[in-house]
Amino acid sequence: MATQAQTPELRRWWLIVLIGRRPRRTLARIAVLVIVCVLVFKFVLIPVRIQGPSMLPTCRENQIHLVNRLAYRFHAPRRGDVVAIQMIQMASQHVMLLKRIVGLPDETVAFHDGRLFINGQMLDEPYVRYSCDWEMRPVAVGPDWYYVVGDNRSMAWADHHQGRASRERIVGKLLL
């Protein structure tokens, strides 16, 4: 137990540890840090919680990932990018899907025996680890649209959300 003489010194030490020797400067730094964090997480990086197994093994269920909203300011989305897609808002809920871009504008996309074909050419997909038996006739993607699908192809076709997404619905690219 501290003696009476040690108690004020101990308090002073704790104050220095918590707020520093210059409290005004420390408070200014904290204010700047809070403002920067609010701006970054409001306008640049969006946290997204993964719900559902459609992106396994790339993203596991209940993980939280960050989506970079500025990723496509200077270039268009590319094949292979994992993107967040804003779905139609229902009752003040913001529903976002995390999917991989496989088809670019003005291409045709098809699945045969579980393999992806772009403009009639089979696409190598090293990120797909689970095989499937999906069948889909060629679909034209259209200008300013992208074809997106999850990495977990072992799911039944009917249980999987995939299809065309307009460029304006793509919010950003998955960070890391």
Image (spheres, helix red, strand yellow):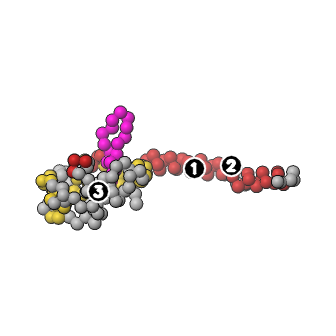
Q: Which amino acid lies under the numbered mark 2 shown in the image of this protein? A: Arg
Q: CA distance from mark 3 to mark 2?
A: 53 Å
Dividing the picture into quadrants, the one containing residue 106 is: bottom left
Say if mark 1 contacts mark 3, CB within 8 Å: no
Instruction: Note whether 68 is above or below 125 in the view shown.
Output: above
Which corner quadrant of the image does residue 93 belong to? top left
Which sits earlier in the primary sequence, circle 1 or circle 2? 2
Mark 3 burial class by Cα count in 10 Å: few <14, some 14-19, many 20+ = many
Q: Earlier in the sequence, mark 1 or mark 3?
A: 1
The part of the image, by quadrant, that contains residue 107 is bottom left
| Range shown magenta | 83-99
Whether residue 85 sits left or right of residue 49 in the image: it is left
For the residue labelled by badge 2, is the local secondary structure a helix, a strand or a loop?
A: helix
Looking at marks 3 and 2 on the same chain, the residue that comes earlier in the sequence is marked by 2
Residue matched to label 2: 24
Front label number (1 vs 3): 3
Residue visible at 38% across and 35% down? 92
Q: Residue at x 76, y 55 (%)?
A: 13
Q: Position of residue 100 (x, y in %)?
A: 29, 56
Task: Check whether the beta carbons of the residues at disc 1 and disc 2 lie within 8 A of each other.
Answer: no
Task: Tell me the CA gap for discs 1 and 3.
Answer: 42 Å
Q: Which residue is mark 1?
A: 32
> Disc 1 marks which amino acid?
Val
Quadrant where the image shows the N terminus: bottom right
Residue 130's spot in the image, x, y percent? 27, 61
Q: Does residue 72 appear in the picture of this structure?
A: no
- Decide whether residue 91 is among the magenta residues: yes
**Residue 18 in view (yes/no):** yes
Number of numbered markers: 3
Is 93 positioned to the left or the right of 102 in the image? right
Residue indicated by mark 3? 152
